[in-house]
Amino acid sequence: MANRIWVAVGIILSLSSQVQSAVDCNTTGVGRFADPTDTTCKKYTLCVYNSSTKIYTSYNYTCPTTLFNPNTGTCSPDYVCEVTNPASSLCTEDGYIPNPNSNCTGFIECVKINNTFTATNYSCPDDTFFNPNTTLCETSYKCPTPTFTCTAAGRFANEADSTCQTYYMCVLVSSNGTYVQEKYNCPSTSVFSPSSSFCTTSYACP
């Protein structure tokens, strides 16, 4: 009886770290990756591959006192968080809008309280995509293919954005040239400068 209890406890403990992750380990592969829905730059996911089962397992972590640097895959005291709250640049009215960092698998709920927007991130159920036309997660919705593809690590301007407020972050995750591509928004008072690869108030958007 005692052995059965210990076996049960062991199973519970092993499953407690395997939680739903905002990072798709099947896409990223092995490594540590920033949570694309986290605006504090503290959360990240560790992707581990089990060669015997051929299944990826994801573990969510939070940097205790520092920020997660997606370039090095570590918690760093020197990293500057460049992810902004989606409400400051995306929310214009109450309702649901696509999460630009989720590749159609998530959405943002915008709520205006005392003339200030608050944004809450949500993920669609597995095998569904957020349809901005119906504001529902649907299996039949076809997510548009991104027009930008990472070919090198770094930050790159979104040439399709006439406001110059969005850019792409490319992170090399394997030696075979595989990149993780994420889209970010500059703070509402700044634009992305392709020359400095940073959000700035001094750059003049063409």
Image (cartoon, helix red, strand yellow):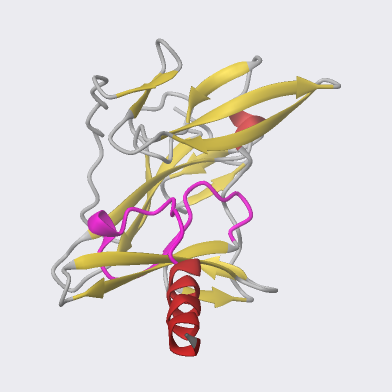
40 falls in the magenta region: yes
Q: Is residue 163 left or right of residue 85?
A: left
Q: Which residue appears farthest toward the front when viewing the image?
A: 1
As drawn, 183 above or below 12: above
Q: Where residue 175 appears, x then y in whole percent?
A: 18, 74
Q: Quadrant of residue 130?
A: top left
Q: Which residue appears farthest toward the top when viewing the image?
A: 133
As drawn, 70 above or below 2: above
Quadrant of the rendering where the C terminus is positioned: top left
Q: Quadrant of residue 85?
A: top right
Residue drawn at the location 42% of the way across and 68% of the way down: 71
- Looking at this view, is 63 or 16 the one in front? 16
- Looking at this view, is 26 or 195 the one in front? 26
Q: Is residue 148 left or right of residue 68?
A: left
Residue drawn at the location 52% of the way across and 36% of the way down: 122
User: What segment carries the magenta color?
Assistant: 18-41
Q: Is residue 190 visible?
A: yes
Q: Where residue 179 appears, x then y in whole percent?
A: 25, 58
As drawn, 143 above or below 60: above
Prevailing SS of the magenta stretch? loop
Q: Is residue 70 visible?
A: no
Q: Where residue 180 appears, x then y in whole percent?
A: 30, 55
Q: Which residue appears farthest toward the right when viewing the image?
A: 114
